[in-house]
Image (cartoon, coloured by chain):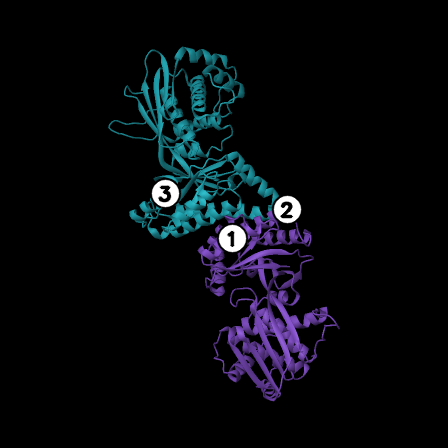
Chain colours: A purple, B cyan
């Protein structure tokens, strides 16, 4: 670690196609978002480890020796290929004064930090005295991979602090990526952090957070798309709260109730992901407008399918209607039932039309960000 | 024929599920509508045959002998199992002063009348001097089977006038049905009338017009549903004009463009028709409200699918939204792209809610009728 510390960042993600269907063995396409999480790692003082997460109101610190002793109490071995043990996490919760059933972002962020810190130091040696600060452009709980971006930043910073990975910055360079094998190591430790936070995550979010770009995920297999054009997408948060767990259960119930009606819909969604992947891989980096009508049609079709499987919401219908009135095509992204929607912005969409759409979205109570994916 | 003549009526139809998918070999469910076409047959005078169709502004009459001579000019034999010949129809058009490419309802109505009249008399002997008047509660060109109801009434009246079928009315009875085998004869001649009007109709409309109730149609095979409960349905005409031919071609184009995405949607629609049939056959004649949620869910799903295959329209979206705001579920029926929509009215929908929905539909420019199917 240099004396000036290190600034790491990782992007959030959106699902272009395949949300929910992915739970039933179909493909999903996830792409990195222009919104990022940033981590600043600086040499600490007084043999203490400090973490500051202004976004969730966390400021904590521990003695390096205290953490070392805690690690000794955790008998199970730490291994980035295995899920964190329930007992290990219980010990960490007790240590940090976190309730056994805590699920608030601040509690889970502290827990993930402690777990990753101890597990990484168990494998690569003590994490030295450092100050870590993390802030994000990503809203939490909106299905945009904020926890994964946090875990990716933490993994990179802690592995770097322990000298398990190199410093990729060459003299005179302002930014750099780690080499591929070190990225893999960062990704597998970030996945551990995601497991602490989410229990049984798919691994897509941390993969997008680590590598960026676009990924296809199916039945546990993650593959990068050959090429990803730069897509402009308007991301809109309906701010309607929802439970992913309840929505996923509802879809399952519908499939069990009407298997002959619902299974073909999942097949159709799978084919949409496949078609979208083919179109994206055939597009040049800065695509001209003629590539967009197919992408827009796929958005429209999938939005109808997501309504069929029961994860729509009046706020999302409104979002689609408002953007359609400006000639723009939208779909929900992620769990649905509220949450976020994405709107394709073709290169020939005039700034005036986009601004008018945003204004109308604001008028119907949606907060929004404009974003670049790529 | 009694001296007081005969009053015949036949219902229109709506498609509950399977429109468009039926073109691609899937099942469709059609049900008889409470809106009917009526025909009054009375003994005529002066050896003339008179037809009066006030709805399309037709009042024509011919000498019985003149029609008999015309029949002699048509060399091809008339057969209810074969399509009317192009040359036969050309002769009839010339005789009636109808342009060769005429497609207006009045021209087609006269042509169908003349064809049926001559073909039936060729088989069963001259149609005697009669006055025929036909009027209808059904709008023409709205996909509600008005031409089939007309053809069914004409077939029954002409066959009756020629004594090819019995008079089903017993002493003291006000209404009656013909026996099954005579209904089959009426249906096959009505199909001939439909062929004159539509060229290559499926035969569903005249089957529903003849037998009423509910029918399943798939790949040319028509079967009656075992039981049909009485369903209350609000029928709304968006009055948005559209071309069935263009819509059917658009669906075919979408299937060719995205076969892997669209074919599963057709499979899902097929399963919806199957599921709906099972539910209807399991329902008692006067079903209680608890049977309706499944029917409503099937309406919603199919409406999304119809949007996916490209036959939706903003007027239909509005119709669905307006009725949804009153807790009622709607879908387009028939060709889509405008045309008619149907709204399920469960027995527990209050008259107040139904009236409020109708008022809101009127306010957004939709004419509507409330109707009973069964």
Q: Chain of mark 3?
A: B
Labelled disc at residue A357: 1
Q: In this rendering, which labeled residue sits more in front, label 1 or label 2? A: 1
Which residue is the extreme one toward the front?
A352
Q: Chain of mark 2?
A: A
Between the residue at mark 1 and the residue at mark 2, the CA separation in whole angstroms equals 21 Å
Location of residue B213 (image quadrant)? top left
B148 up-or-down from B269: above or below: above
Query: Are circles 2 and 3 on residues that touch, CB within 8 Å?
Result: no
* Callouts 2 and 3 on one subunit: no
Q: Which residue is mark 2?
A: A290
Q: Nearer the viewer, residue B98 or B206?
A: B98
Residue A283 percent coordinates (x, y): 67, 51
The kind of secondary structure element at disc 2 is helix
Between the residue at mark 2 and the residue at mark 3, the CA separation in whole angstroms equals 39 Å
Residue B336 percent coordinates (x, y): 47, 40
- Counting other residues with Cα less than 10 Å from the Cα at mark 2, is it few (<14), some (14-19), or many (20 or more)? few
Q: In the image, what residue occupies the spot 62% across and 55% down?
A: A231
Q: Which residue is mark 3?
A: B363
Labelled disc at residue A307: none
Between the residue at mark 1 and the residue at mark 3, the CA separation in whole angstroms equals 27 Å
Q: In the image, what residue occupies the spot 65% across and 68% down?
A: A210
Q: Nearer the viewer, residue A248 or A135?
A: A135
Q: Nearer the viewer, residue B48 or B229?
A: B48
A88 up-or-down from B109: above or below: below
A209 up-or-down from B151: above or below: below
The kind of secondary structure element at disc 3 is helix
Q: In this rendering, which labeled residue sits more in front, label 1 or label 3? A: 1
Q: Chain of mark 1?
A: A
Residue A85 percent coordinates (x, y): 57, 78
- Counting other residues with Cα less than 10 Å from the Cα at mark 1, is it few (<14), some (14-19), or many (20 or more)? many
């Amino acid at each position: 670690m240099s004396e000036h510390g290190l600034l790491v960042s990782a992007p959030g993600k959106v699902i272009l196609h395949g949300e929910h269907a992915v739970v039933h063995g179909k493909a999903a396409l996830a792409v990195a978002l222009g919104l990022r999480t940033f981590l600043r790692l600086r040499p600490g003082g007084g043999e203490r480890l400090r973490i500051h997460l202004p976004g969730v109101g966390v400021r904590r610190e521990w003695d390096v020796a205290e953490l070392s002793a805690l690690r000794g109490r955790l008998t199970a071995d730490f291994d980035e290929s295995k899920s964190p043990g329930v007992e290990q996490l219980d010990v960490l919760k007790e240590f940090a004064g976190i309730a056994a059933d805590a699920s608030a972002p601040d509690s889970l962020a502290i827990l993930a930090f402690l777990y990753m810190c101890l597990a990484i130091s168990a494998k690569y040696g003590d994490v030295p005295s450092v100050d870590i600060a993390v802030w994000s452009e990503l809203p939490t709980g909106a299905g945009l991979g904020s926890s994964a971006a946090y875990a990716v930043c933490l993994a990179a910073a802690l592995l770097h602090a322990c000298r398990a990975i190199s410093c990729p910055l060459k003299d005179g360079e302002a930014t750099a990526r780690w080499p591929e094998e070190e990225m893999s190591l960062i990704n597998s430790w970030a996945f551990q952090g995601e497991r602490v936070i989410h229990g049984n995550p798919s691994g897509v979010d941390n993969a997008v957070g680590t590598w960026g770009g676009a990924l296809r995920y199916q039945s546990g297999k993650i593959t990068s798309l050959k090429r990803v054009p730069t897509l402009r997408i308007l991301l809109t948060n309906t701010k309607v709260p929802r439970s992913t767990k309840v929505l996923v259960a509802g879809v399952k119930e519908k499939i069990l109730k009407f298997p002959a009606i619902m299974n073909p819909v999942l097949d159709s969604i799978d084919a949409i992901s496949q078609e979208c992947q083919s179109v994206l891989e055939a597009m040049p980096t800065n695509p001209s407008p003629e590539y967009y009508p197919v992408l827009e049609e796929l958005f429209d079709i999938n939005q109808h399918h997501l309504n069929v499987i029961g994860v729509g919401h009046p706020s999302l219908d409104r979002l689609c209607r408002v953007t359609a009135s400006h000639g723009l095509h939208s779909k929900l992204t992620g769990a649905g039932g509220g949450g976020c929607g994405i709107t394709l912005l073709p290169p020939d969409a005039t700034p005036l039309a986009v601004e008018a759409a945003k204004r109308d979205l604001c008028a119907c109570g949606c907060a929004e960000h404009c974003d670049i994916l790529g």
